[in-house]
Amino acid sequence: MKISSKTHGIIDYVFVVFLWLSPTLFGLAETTALFTYILGGIHLAMTLLTNFEVGIIKWIPFRLHGLIELVVAIALGGVAFYLGNLEGDLSRNYYLGLAVTILVVFLLTDFKKTTVIE
C-alpha cells in the first residue's frame, strides 16, 4: 500500500498540529519545546509551498519535498540524542519517534504518481 500525494499532504498538516500541541501534551522541556514549535513552523511552510493537491503556493516539487523529509528524518535521529543529553530521556525518545514517523511516511509515499498542479 502506497500513500498518495494528497494523503501525504493531509498527514503533513496533521503532523504540524501534533508538533504544536506536543510540548503541552507531553510536558516537553524548554529547549525541546522550542525546537518542536520551530520544526512545526518549518514543516508547515514546506507543506504550504509544495506542488501537490494540498499545497497553496506550489513552488517546491513534491519529490524534493520527500527528499527534504528524508534528510530531516535522519537529522532528527541526531537531534534526539543531543536533546536527550541536554534534557533527558523524554526529549530523546520523542525525537526518535518523530524521526521514525517521518521515515515511515517517506517510505510509504508514492512519489512517482504525483499530481503536479500547473
Image: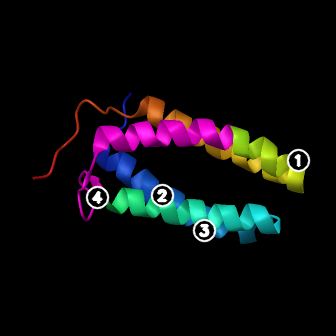
Report the residue at 70% width, 68% height from top.
34
* Separation of marks 3 and 4 at Cα, in angstroms: 20 Å
Q: Earlier in the sequence, mark 2 or mark 3?
A: 3
Relative to 116, is 58 above or below?
below
Relative to 118, is 16 above or below?
below
Circle 4: residue type? Val
Q: Earlier in the sequence, mark 4 or mark 2?
A: 2
Q: Are marks 1 and 4 in contact (CB under 8 Å)?
A: no
Between disc 2 and disc 1, the foreground one is 1
Report the residue at 52% width, 37% height from top.
71
Whether residue 56 appears in magenta in the rendering, the answer is yes
Circle 2: residue type? His
Whether residue 4 is visible to the viewer of this picture, yes or no, is no
* Separation of marks 4 and 2 at Cα, in angstroms: 13 Å
Q: What number is the disc on residue 54?
A: 4
Q: What number is the disc on residue 43?
A: 2
Residue 83: % across, % down: 80, 51
Q: What number is the disc on residue 85?
A: 1
Circle 3: residue type? Trp
* Separation of marks 1 and 3 at Cα, in angstroms: 22 Å
Report the residue at 23% width, 39% height from top.
114
Q: What number is the disc on residue 20?
A: 3
